[in-house]
Amino acid sequence: MNKTDSIARRILGWALNRWDRWYDCEKGVFIHDSEFQPEHNLGHAMLIVQKLEEYGFTFHTNGESEVSFNEVKGTGETLSQAITNAAYSLIEKHSVTNTSRVWQQLC
């Protein structure tokens, strides 16, 4: 599972419908993988920020190349990449530690 897949499934709560698209249960729509590119599209990256803020995470940015969600930081060449990297770092961090409590919060 790549970065974008992990974010779509674990943070946004989208279900993998087939190999090239997800299903957003909340909105009842299908999202093709070409329609969700958070590393390249700031609007898509901000969907991640919005969802994590709903879960209680605080978003901070330090310019165009560094962001954090609470204590988890991410960097990138663009703000979109930094957001995506920080979100993926959050997934990785909580996948290794106590996942039951965190994923109840995230999912």
Image (tube, helix red, strand yellow):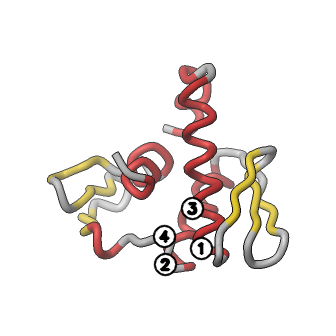
The kind of residue on which mark 1 rests is Ser
Is there a contact, CB below 8 Å, between mark 3 and mark 1? yes
The kind of residue on which mark 3 rests is Thr
Secondary element type, mark 3: helix
Is there a contact, CB below 8 Å, between mark 3 and mark 4? yes
**In-image side of 71 versus 24 (left or right):** right
- In this view, the residue in front, 103 or 27, is 103
Q: Earlier in the sequence, mark 3 or mark 4?
A: 4
- In this view, the residue in front, 48 or 72, is 72
Q: Earlier in the sequence, mark 1 or mark 4?
A: 4
Q: Quadrant of residue 48?
A: bottom right
Q: Quadrant of residue 24?
A: bottom left
Secondary element type, mark 4: loop
**In-image side of 34 versus 61 (left or right):** left
Which residue is the site of mark 2? Answer: 40
**What distance separates the C-alpha of mark 2 from that of mark 3?**
9 Å
Which residue is the site of mark 1? Answer: 80
Q: Residue 38: which numbered mark, if any?
A: 4
Q: Is residue 13 above or below residue 44?
A: above
Secondary element type, mark 1: helix
Secondary element type, mark 2: loop
Which residue is depicted at the point 62% across and 22% down? 97
Q: Residue 84: which numbered mark, if any?
A: 3
**In-image side of 28 versus 100 (left or right):** left
Q: Earlier in the sequence, mark 1 or mark 2?
A: 2
Is there a contact, CB below 8 Å, between mark 1 and mark 4? yes
Indicate the position of residue 67 as horizontal and vertical percent values. 75, 63
Q: Badge 3: how crowded within 10 Å, few (<14), some, or many (20+)?
A: many
